[in-house]
Every structure is written in C-alpha cells, then in structure tokens.
Amino acid sequence: MHPNPRLSQFLDGCSVQSDLFLATSEQAEWRLGAILFASRGSAFATVRKAPVEGADYEFAGLRTLPGGMARATPEDGPSTAHELLARSLLNRVRREAGLRPEMLGDLAPAPMGPLLTSYTAKERLRFTLVIPHTCIVAAQAELRSDDRSVEAAEWQDLPPDWRRMAPANRVAVAHLVWRTLSVSQRADAEALVDEGVRQCSAWAALIGLPGVPLPWADPEELERWRSAWPE
C-alpha cells in the first residue's frame, strides 16, 4: 500500500491534460511535479538553477532538489499518474544531477501534504503542486548536470544553507530533517524556514489550497496537512 493513502487517492484522480501535464482536471490551476531528497550519509543532492534567457526567473542562482514538473511524452503510452510521476522524476534527476536509477535506492513519497511552488512564465503566474520523494544514493555516486536549466549539481551537507534554497525546497527539506538538527541548528534555521512556509502558504491561498505548517507544529496539525490532498 502507498505510505500515504490520501496521497495515493489523490494521484488516482490525476491524469494527463491537454498540455501533457498532470492534474485532476483541465480547470485545475496547478500542474503536478516531484522533487527528490537523495541522501548520501549526512549530505543530499541539490542543483543550482540557471538564469532563463530573456526572462527574470525567480529562482535563478538558488538551490533546489532535483526534479520538476511531470510531463507525458509520446513514448510513455498508457500510464497511471503514479507511473508517469515516478518516470518523469527519475528522468529529471538523471539529467539535472547525473543520478541514474541504478545509483538510487527505492523512491518513496515523503510524509507531507500539499506543497505549492510558483513561478512566472510568459508573463503569467504558474503553480506547481510538488510531491517530495526520498531515497538513499549509492556511496560512490557523483553529481553532474546535463540540463541547461541547471548551473551546477552539488552535494549539500546538513544543515543546509537555508538562505540559498528556493522556498518550497527549503520547506520540504526542513520537514524531512528537522528532527535530526541540533537545538542550535534549529534556532539558526527557524526564521528562514518560517519565511519559506509563509511564502508557500501564500501561494496556496491564491488558488484555494491549504497552507503549510511549520516543521515544529504540533502532531495533529502536521497530520491534518498530510491528509489534505485535493479531491
């Protein structure tokens, strides 16, 4: 069984839309994406986003987890949203960070609820509903990028440089590692993590999705968020 039954039900309701991206309907204001927290010991893989020629790309120069929007291709054939999401994620991780499937352990969706990011393309605000995944990377794996959207692929030690991480990625990593941080590391991170949570929650409010709790929220609030995937 999928580790989060509510997320599994949500994915069952997603399909490829006319733009070839995944969503629950054409009318959905978001499209689906995935990112990967690929860890090797106390470090994890990040990519530094490149500028976009002729555009003011909000995340240029910031670090993110490898991944991106899930888009169908003519080679995919009939596939479930679960299959397309995993295939797209593995392809992006290989291109952006040089991590091939044989270097990766089993991918698993992280225990999180809806996490929204936003960017501007063709003078329009776009929204991506992100599903973070996790896996363990082979010890000998090295990072390299063959994707023009990436300036560099780099291992990031814990605690990361929170200020240099894009908001949704900052929030995802914080939720994944918070319990492993020391008291002083948490104190150093709180203001920047809070800033990322407020930004992601503001994007979610624009399209009627629930906000994101802080990693140190009470267990009941965290559980409500984990079950808050759209119908």
Image (cartoon, rainbow, N blue to C red):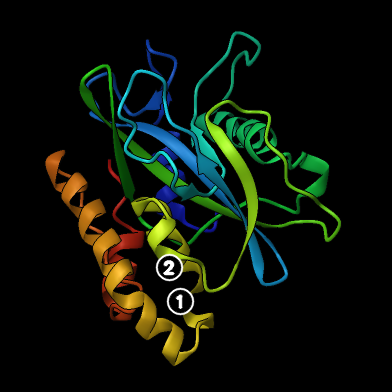
- Could you tell me how far apart the alpha carbons at marks 2 and 1 are, in whole angstroms? 6 Å
Q: Residue 218 carries which label?
A: none
Camera-side residue of 111 and 11: 111
Q: Residue 178 carries which label?
A: 1
Where residue 98 sits in the image (x, y, percent)? 73, 39
Q: What residue type is labelled 2?
A: His
Give the side of residue 149 with respect to residue 115, left or right: right
Name the residue furthest bottom: 183
Secondary structure at numbered mark 1: helix
Q: Which residue is drawn at 41% across and 25% down?
A: 52
Give the side of residue 157 with respect to residue 228, left or right: right
Q: Which residue is drawn at 38% across and 16% down?
A: 17
Camera-side residue of 54 and 147: 54
Disc count in the image?
A: 2
Kindly indicate whether the residue at mark 1 contacts the one at mark 2 (C-beta within 8 angstroms): yes
State whether residue 147 is above or below residue 41. Answer: above
Secondary structure at numbered mark 2: helix
State whether residue 158 is above or below residue 164. Answer: below
The residue wearing badge 2 is 175
Q: Residue at x 53, y 49 (%)?
A: 65
Q: Residue at x 67, y 41 (%)?
A: 97
Where residue 39 sits in the image (x, y, percent)? 67, 61
Q: What residue type is labelled 1?
A: Trp
Which quadrant: the C terminus?
top left
Give the side of residue 43 with respect to residue 186, left or right: right
Give the side of residue 125 with respect to residue 181, left or right: left
Where residue 91 sits in the image (x, y, percent)? 65, 31
Within 10 Å of disc 2 (Cα), the crowding (few <14, some 14-19, many 20+) is some
